[in-house]
Structures are given as structure tokens and as C-alpha cells.
Amino acid sequence: MSNLIPAIKVKNLSFYYSKSKAIEGISMDIYQNQVTAIIGPSGCGKSTFIKTLNRISELEGSVKVEGSVEFLGQNIYNSRINLNQLRRQIGMVFQKPNPFSMSIYENVAYGMRISRRRSPTELDEIVESALKDAALWDEVKDKLNKSALGLSGGQQQRLCIARALAVKPKILLMDEPCSALDPIATMKVEELIHSLRSQLTIAIVTHNMQQATRVSDFTAFFSTDESRIGQMVEFGTTEQIFNNPLDSRTRDYVSGRFG
């Protein structure tokens, strides 16, 4: 790990929804141009954690944060941080595809239109590039003006990935992006993750152990017990976490004994 550069440094992060603690004392690095999987049983804080990395969790109500999340040398919880700019640089793909009720083209172009004025030619080029990066161009190039809601679930999820990629983020967060997809669509998203790792940093929450081993370079195992809520039990290379875990709770989970 010594030659890897952290894209995000999480230091002693605890997060509360109102007065309810969701995660506690998380410290870990998410490395540049690597895929980091977040695994663990339901209710352990995986999705909450990934949403803290671009402050999108704050859209869900009153929150409280302790500790820090450093990106580009700054704590993103500093009051001077521009949230719109932060969320363009750290994009998000959710569990269920959430295309806008507009055309395929306008879904991808949306982020550019609201950030700054671009020529139609420039927009066309960015939309085509993002759809190609999301492995969707060949399937939709002849129906860009048709509603995105007419696409299949797997196509909609890849469209949402294209929408996130269009604004050229440095990091892409994925919260169980395949949980609503069939095996063929899941395979396409996993192939996409492999192809994108050279361009940007990816953090993915997944409940699928096989998926974590297939797509990720590093894995963080989260768990919870009666005494501690939302803790990170262990972090390491994916090979080490699955083949030689240091903590018995990690070993029990990845072997299927609980969770």
C-alpha cells in the first residue's frame, strides 16, 4: 500500500442522524484508481458511511458529524466547502436506478447544463463520451431523444453512471448498484467498474461477497454489536480480507456463518 495515494482520508468519523449514532470511529484511506468495497450485515452503517463521503447524507435530515473526511487536502465538513462542486467531484450512483423523467440525452447532459454554458457541439461530445464510458452508447445512440424511463433496469443504472461520469468526477461512490438488477445486467455493471478504475477512484457498497471479490482491490468490513454501532472491524486488500482475515468476526462473515 506504500506506493498508493489516498483519494480520501477518513479520520475517526462518527455520524449521527439527529441523536441516533449510525457509525462510530471510522478511520480508513480510499486509494486513488482503486476499487474499495464496503461489506457487512444489514444495519451496520455501510450506506450511511458512503453517503458521508460527499455529504449527500445531509439531504436526509438533521445530522451531526465528528471526525473528518479529507479530499484534496481539505476536510469536506469545513463550513466553507462548496457542496455542489464537491458532489460533482465525488459522484454517486444509488441502489435503485433513478433516471430523470426526460430524454436519455438530457439525463446525461443535465449536470453540464446546470454547471456552466456549453455549445451544442460540446454537449453532444460529452454525452457521447459518457455513454461510451458507461458501455451504453451502442444500445441508445439511435434513441437519445426518447424517454430514459423506457430503458430496462440495467440500462437505466448504466445511464445513471453515465450521468455521474459526464461531469468528470474524481471519485465515484456506488451504493449497492446491482441489487435491483438481473445477473446479466449485474455482469455489465461489474465489467464497467473494471474499465473505469483506470480513470477514477471507486467505492462500492455491496452485500454480495462474490461481487466484492470480483471487482475490488480493497475491502472494509463493517459490523455492529450490542456495545458498538456501525464500526469498521477490519480493512485490507480484498485478497487478505477474504483469504486471511485477522478478526474472527470478519472470518465468520466472509465464510457465511452470519449476516
Image: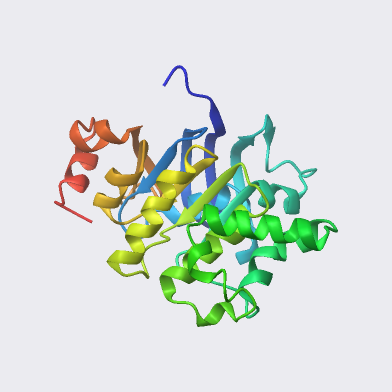
Res 160 → quadrant: bottom right
Residue 17 in sight from this viewpoint? no
* Front residue of 182 and 44: 182
* Front residue of 32 and 44: 32
171 on left or right of 126: left
Q: Quadrant of the C terminus?
A: bottom left
34 on left or right of 161: left
* Front residue of 43 and 240: 240
Q: How many labels does the image show?
A: 0
Q: Is residue 166 above or below residue 245?
A: below
Res 130 → quadrant: bottom right
Query: Which residue does the image show at 80% across and 43% down from the upper left?
Result: 80
The x and y percentages for residue 142 are: 57, 73
Q: In this view, does 191 lie above or below 140?
A: above
The x and y percentages for residue 113 are: 78, 63
Q: Quadrant of the N terminus?
A: top left
Res 213 → quadrant: top left
Query: Which residue does the image show at 60% across and 38% down from the upper left?
Result: 69
Coloration of the structure image: rainbow
Query: Which residue does the image show at 53% across and 70% down from the upper left?
Result: 140
176 on left or right of 171: left
Residue 67 in sight from this viewpoint? yes
The x and y percentages for residue 34 are: 45, 35
Query: Which residue does the image show at 49% across and 77% down from the upper left?
Result: 151
The x and y percentages for residue 55 are: 63, 52
